[in-house]
Image (cartoon, grey):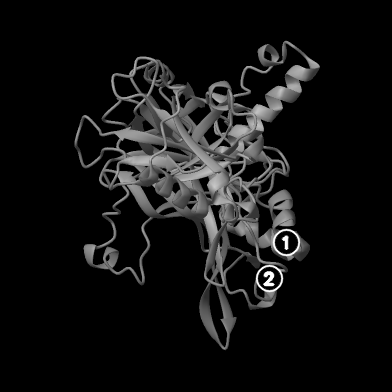
Amino acid sequence: DLHSFPTRRSSDLIAIMSCIAFTSCDDTTDTIGNSLTDNMDMLEVTTDTFNVETRSIVADSVLSRSTTGYLGRIRDLETGNYITSDFMAQFSTLENYSFPEKDSIASLKDGEVIADSCSIRLFYTDYYGDSLATMNVTAYEMNEPMKEGVKYYSNFDPIAEGLIRSNGIKVNKTYTLTDLSVSEEDRADADSYTPNIKINLNKPYTDKNGVTYNNYGTYIMRKYYEDPSRFKNPYNFIHEVCPGFYFKTNDGLGSMAYITVSQLNVFFKYRNDSTYVGTASFSATEEVLQTANISNDKQNIADLANDNTCTYLKTPAGIFTEITLPIDEITANHSNDTINTAKITLTRINNDTHNEYSLSAPSTLLMIPKDSLYSFFENEDIPDYKKSFIATYSSSTNNYTFNNISGLITYMALEKAKGIAGDPNWTTKNPNWNKVVVIPISTTTVTVNNVESIVKVEHDMSLTSTRLVGGSANPNEPVKINVIYSKFNHK
């Protein structure tokens, strides 16, 4: 009987009291107060375990804003799902950026300043798949910048939304992630070479005013010499010179590059006693917007989500796991008790296939109320261990453990009580009141005085996949939540 309480043995009590003593000093739990240290004989501790319902839910799209761009198309060997990623990048300038004095420029044509060449380089430090897979990408010039303050999701397509300049730059590039035009010796020199995809912008370019330049770099330079204020800050540069580029995968299968730096480079010669080659570089940074457009095989994703023998976690923008917490069962007959700890462990099911290209499991998971699925990320919230929690994958136990979500249990129980007090049909109108969602995330941390703190949480946009024990037709042991209660018996 899941609702019966075990008889306390002295060894059990010592273990439970150790747990309470530890967790009561942790700001991630509900404390039971300083009185714990007094009148220990009056403290009654009980434990219970409850089954938990889980299921997969399709994440049609996720908030897409990252310093990493993902480019390519791959097939998940275990599930057969095809994943394609394109991305948009805007380029930034340093504050009050300046080219050399105009009369020092040695690259001239008919007495006018020109660029010798121009290119975009997409630098990557990691990738998934086969580095020799032949891929094809098109770089599209944006007609206007993506708007500040707008929340762009991973299903946002700038082409479909009409943000691509119809008669602007459209450059096609076939590539392999291992650039065979660079010698093996040079590629091995990590100090001087970073793998990249190079897209040349050297063909004649006509701007929106109908002015034609010998290449895009010449357009950039002349815009500066016409009015340097256009380069005063990133906002001016994006709105008055270069609104950005969209990089779309056209063909190929087998690789996905994790683009860490997108860079627009303009090359020219200038004089300063001697003649030098100058480079003006404009990079995608956190100050400007970068978004990914993710597309999955929708039928395949739906089929996986409908598999009730397990639940899935798939990124990017694939599948999350929903958990229905048994709040009523946990709180029944415990109105005078404190919930000290409530622990859920999600066990990973190992892959059926073993291949060098098998997707790895996500490393970090976030648990939040289902109704916070969008607002948490849009508000740039940080886990508070009251209503939002983090668990990391343990390879030794092959699971993810949320060690104490007691604050969430208490919060949901109170919300229901308040809701029903005002409306007997509250639960019907709020069907997600006792549901949470588990989401793969990536985090940014800072360390101050040897204390590491999370300062940013984003959706994990890398390629990950795993199955978890659970689902309505789960053939394994049920997913459980373990609860420890305490109360004082004042005699």
Question: Looking at the image, is 388 positioned above or below residue 320?
Answer: below
Q: Is residue 248 left or right of residue 372?
A: left
Name the secondary structure under disc 2.
loop
User: In the rendered image, which residue does mark 1 sit on?
Assistant: 233
Name the secondary structure under disc 1.
loop
Three-letter residue code for mark 2: Ser
- State how far apart marks 1 and 2 are (Cα): 11 Å
Question: Looking at the image, is 351 positioned above or below residue 186?
Answer: above
- Within-10-Å neighbours for mark 2: few <14, some 14–19, many 20+: some
Residue mark closest to the camera, 1 vs 2: 1
The quadrant of the picture occupied by the N terminus is top left
Q: Residue furthest right?
A: 422
User: In the rendered image, which residue does mark 2 sit on?
Assistant: 98
| Residue 379 image point, x, y percent | 69, 42
Query: Residue 128 bears which disc, if any?
Result: none
Residue nearest the observer in this picture, 435 or 10: 10
Q: Residue at x 62, y 47 (%)?
A: 32
Three-letter residue code for mark 1: Asn
**Res 202 visible:** no
